[in-house]
Amino acid sequence: MATFDHYDQGTPSWVELVTPDQKGAQEFYTGLFGWGYDDNDMGDMGHYFIATLDGGEIGGVSGQQPGMEGHPAYWGVYLAVDDVDAASAKVEPAGGKVEAGPLDVNENGRMAAIQDPTGARVGLWQAGTTIGTQRANQPGTPTWNEVVTADIPGAVAFYGAVLGMGSEEMDMGEAGTYTVLTNAEGRQIGGAMNPPMEGVPPHWNIYFNVEDVDASLAKVEELGGKTVAPAFDVPGVGRMAMAADPQGASFWVMAAAEQA
């Protein structure tokens, strides 16, 4: 089991579901991944549920805030930063927007919500008592994240300017090349890809590790979700598919190839 107690700057460190039906979402992901939940009473802001697996925190399940009525559910990503105020100060000079914060989340940490110049929204998280996802890269936990945008060079330049991230190209054979995002030490921490079809807005993807992609898709549909992109194999990477939960939040399931 992969347990994490620190994330280098730029590394995706937390995932969060924003949904109009927290109870329904909890039931779905418990059935799919075996998650449990810790209930955090946020007073006037409602309840924030932290998904857990094998004693470790996986991600958050949040209700929608006022003004979001009717908005489909969605998964969001947070990137670790050493100093959220310093990073946020670089966002607008690099062409992005700071949409909220920086602000403290009790003693848990400090965060900001930003939008990159291509339109993809992402959070920044400076750890306090909470570092983020404690278990990853095992079945039922996050295993990969990528920004989906029609302007990969623009996104790469932005995250480089704000977080010191770099990039490298990976040969995917018949599928062409894939842009891998790296941290300051050159370690692979995420990816960037063009939208798979017209009409897909810029956003950050979440991949969850599973033992069997096809069995997971069957479970998704049994639980009221749907298959968005059928399972397919990527040589040297693994088998993957895109799904959506009953409230409309999309995510990927992936079983990595042994050599990946």
Image (tube, rainbow, N blue to C red):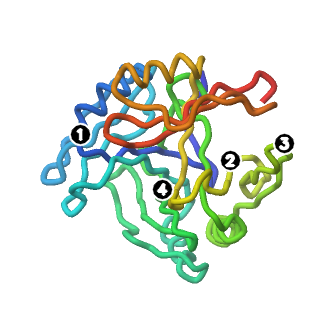
The quadrant in which the N terminus is found is top right
Check disc 1 and give the amino acid type. Asp
Q: Residues within 10 Å of mark 3 (few under 14, many from 20)?
A: few
| Whole-number angstrom distance, CA of label 3 to CA of label 2 | 24 Å
Instruction: Give the camera-side residue of 173 and 9.
Output: 173
Q: Which residue is mark 3?
A: 174
Front label number (4 vs 2): 2
Which of labels 4 and 1 is toward the front?
Answer: 1
For the point 68% across and 50% down, the residue is 191
Q: Which amino acid type corresponds to the residue marked 4 in the rendered image?
A: Trp
The number of callouts visible is: 4
Q: CA distance from mark 1 to mark 2?
A: 31 Å
The tag earlier along the polypeptide, 4 or 2, is 4
Q: Separation of disc 4 and disc 2 at Cα?
A: 15 Å
Find disc 4 in the rendering and name its residue: 125
Whole-percent x, y for residue 167 in the image: 77, 58
- Relative placement, left or right, of 103 versus 63 is right
Amino acid of disc 2: Ile
- Check the image and name the residue furthest to the front: 198
Choose the circle earlier in sequence order: 4 or 1.
Answer: 1
Label 3, label 4: how far apart the Cα atoms are: 37 Å
Which disc number belongs to residue 189?
2
